[in-house]
Image: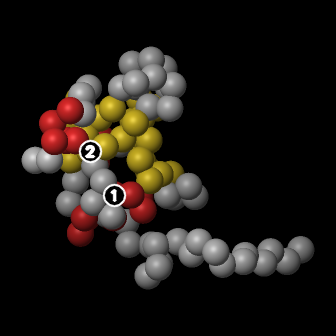
Amino acid sequence: MSEDEEQVSIYDEVEIEDMTFDETLEMYSYPCPCGDKFEIALYDLRDGADIAVCPSCSLMIRVIFEVEDLPKGNEDGGIEKGKEVVVSA
C-alpha cells in the first residue's frame, strides 16, 4: 500500500453489486449520508480506481469489484476524447 492510500480516510467499503449503474453516463452511484451520492465512472474503474467520492461532502467509499465483471460496452470504452461527434436531425 502506498503512502497516499494510507492517508485516505474511507467512510465505508461497498460491493459494486449494491451500487446503481447509469448506462447513459457510464457512472456508478451509491447514496451518501449527506443526501447526495457517491460517484465513480466506469472508465475509472476499468483503469483500476476504486474510490468513489461524494461531490457534496468529504466522504469517500472504496468500491469492491473485479474488473472482468464490469459492463463491457464498446471496445474503446465509450466516446473517445478528442473525437468529434456528429448528430444529425
Q: Is residue 17 visible?
A: no
Q: Residue at x 33, y 32 (%)?
A: 60
Residue at the bottom extreme, as displayed? 75
Label 2: element kind: strand
Q: Quadrant of the C terminus?
A: bottom right
Q: On the picture, is 68 further left or further right than 76? A: left
Q: Which residue is mark 2?
A: 63
Residue beneath the point at 39% across and 19% down: 33
> Which residue is at the far top?
34
In the current view of this chain or complex, which residue is farthest to the right? Answer: 89
Q: Residues within 10 Å of mark 1 (few under 14, many from 20)?
A: some
Establish if 28 lies above or below 34: below
- Circle 1/circle 2 CB separation < 8 Å: yes
Q: Nearer the viewer, residue 73 or 55?
A: 55
Q: Which residue is mark 1?
A: 45
Position above or below: 8 against 44: above
The location of residue 49, given as percent across then percent down, is: 30, 54
Q: Residue at x 33, y 64 (%)?
A: 47
Could you say where residue 29 lies in the image, as x and y percent from the top left?
Answer: 43, 41
Give the secondary structure at mark 1.
helix
Between residue 15 and residue 53, name the one nearer to us: 53
